[in-house]
Image (cartoon, rainbow, N blue to C red):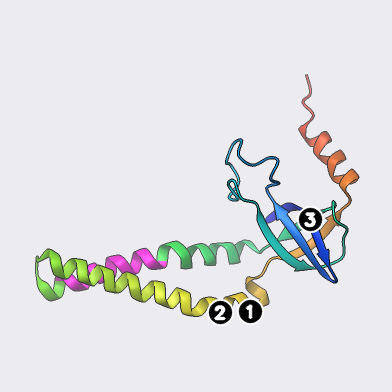
Amino acid sequence: MEKVGEITGKQGELLEVTFCRPQDCGHCHACEGGAEPTVLRLRGEGQVGDYAVVSLPGSTVVKASLLAYVLPIAGLLGGMAIGSALGGEGGVWVAVGGAAGLGLTLGAVWLTERFRSRSARWQPTLTRVLPRSLYEKQEEETNHVQP
């Protein structure tokens, strides 16, 4: 997966890349930044005002989605099933089991986040930097409508 963001700051080797520019936000809410821009700090060479192409392997995006969405739901449903098996049809046992299963899976995701945040495999990388003039020219050509 690749996204293009604007380089909005530079401190030594670190570039601050902002996605979903603030002047665009608030109009359609289509980007995941919503009203607030998403900012990443990455190592690389570039100038403020240039555009950075940042990539993250598709398999990593899928794994992160599974961890964030599917695993907690599986924990909730599994806990509910165990609660039902232990307590019969009583709604209290099902609720307690579901809460325990959800809590355990969310705790596991939270505990392993430290490892993932330090692993280069889970981090986005700077693919290339496009000067502002080249990026704007490409955007103009891409968005030009032929009659």
Q: Residue at x 38, y 67 (%)?
A: 72
Left or right of 136 on screen, residue 41: left
Q: Nearer the viewer, mark 3 or mark 1?
A: 3
Q: Residue at x 18, y 67 (%)?
A: 94
Q: Earlier in the sequence, mark 3 or mark 1?
A: 3
Q: Main secondary structure of the magenta part?
A: helix
Q: Residues within 10 Å of mark 2 (few under 14, many from 20)?
A: few
* Residue receiving disc 1: 118
Secondary structure, mark 1, is helix
- 120 lies above or below 47: below
Residue 122 is a magenta residue: no
Residue extent of the magenta highlight: 71-84
Amino acid at circle 1: Arg
* Residue receiving disc 3: 8
Residue 83 is a magenta residue: yes
Quarter of the image that includes the N terminus: bottom right
Secondary structure, mark 3, is strand
Amino acid at circle 3: Thr
Dot 1 and dot 2 residues touching (CB under 8 Å): yes
* Residue receiving disc 2: 114
